[in-house]
Amino acid sequence: MERTNMFEQTNNRGFFSAQQGTQDATVAKTFMTQVFGWMTLAMLVTAVTAYWFSSSESLMRSLINVETGGMTGLGWIVTLAPLGFVLLMSFGFQRLSPAVLTLLFISFSVLMGMSLSFILLVYTAASVYKTFAITAAMFGIMAVTGYTTKTDLTKFGSIMMMGLIGLMVAMLVNFFLQSSAMDYIISVVGVLIFTGLTAYDVQRLKRMGAGSGEYGEANTRKLSILGALTLYLDFINLFMFLLRFLGDRK
């Protein structure tokens, strides 16, 4: 009789554990759907804005001084402001309401579109579209890998983050050296780092999403926006590094 009760208790624990696992998987799937939804919206806003500005001579003149070839005051603001928006959204997470965070995210997407409009003046449209398609394919593969793999990518992600710091230092050094060989190496390393970070970030967000039911609706929405921002930056950086050696200059 005692052994039968123990057996039943074990089965019950297994049942509730499986049920909890199923619920966590459902919550995580819902959360990731929101994350990718916000990211897709941001990418569309950026793409439309970039095309709009690059197609308008008057708008581009507001960003670039045609006579000197340098950027105007607005051009510098557009170039530097996205970093400020990222910092504001990241460090102001607790204080900002979901509505304000959403507005900041959309505004950030517009600014990025204005900033990226420059690439359509430097590279041919065909090479930009080709590189975008390759980026989308690579991002999709790594996103699926990060979502489905059973391997813990925490240590791998830490290595990627260390590599990212090293990459930023190398880019700063090469800003003064202007070495074409080093620029090529930086581009290759950048592609590898952001390819790896995509898988790591998707897995991290999936795990975060599994417990998002405990955060409340407002915080869950804010977390989904910050998650979308993370993946958006992974995609854009991967695209830019690929473009550096796949893009055909005009």
Image (cartoon, rainbow, N blue to C red):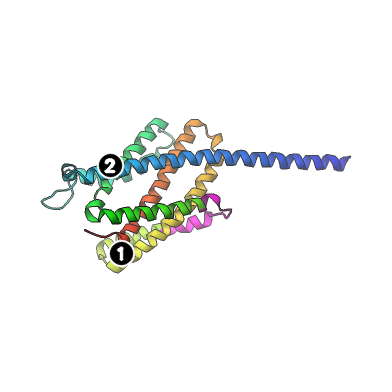
Look at mark 2 in the image and give the residue it sits on.
49
Magenta region, residue range: 145-163
Q: Which residue sits furthest right? A: 1
Left or right? Give the position of 85 relative to 68.
Answer: right
- Disc 1, disc 2: CB below 8 Å? no
Q: Residue at x 33, y 55 (%)?
A: 130
Which of the marked residues, 1 or 2, is nearer the chain's N terminus?
Answer: 2
On-image quarter of the N terminus: top right
Task: Say few, some or many: other residues with alpha carbon within 10 Å of mark 1 (under 14 / 14 to 19 / 20 or more).
Answer: some
Occupied quadrant, residue 189: bottom left
Give residue 190's position: percent from left, percent from top.
38, 59
Give residue 140's position: percent from left, percent from top.
45, 51
SS at mark 2?
helix
Q: Residue at x 41, y 42 (%)?
A: 39
* Picture disc at residue 183: 1
Left or right? Give the position of 200 relative to 74.
Answer: right
Left or right? Give the position of 21 relative to 3.
Answer: left
| Residue 249 in sight in this render | yes
Vertical comparison of 192 with 46: above or below:
below
**Distance of label 1 from label 2 (alpha carbons):** 28 Å
Q: Which residue sits furthest bottom? A: 181
Q: In front: 90, or 149?
A: 149
Q: Residue at x 17, y 48 (%)?
A: 64
Q: In front: 198, or 215?
A: 198
| Residue 97 in sight in this render | no
Vertical comparison of 246 with 26: above or below:
below
SS at mark 1?
helix
Give residue 99's position: percent from left, percent from top.
39, 30
Left or right? Give the position of 20 relative to 91.
Answer: right
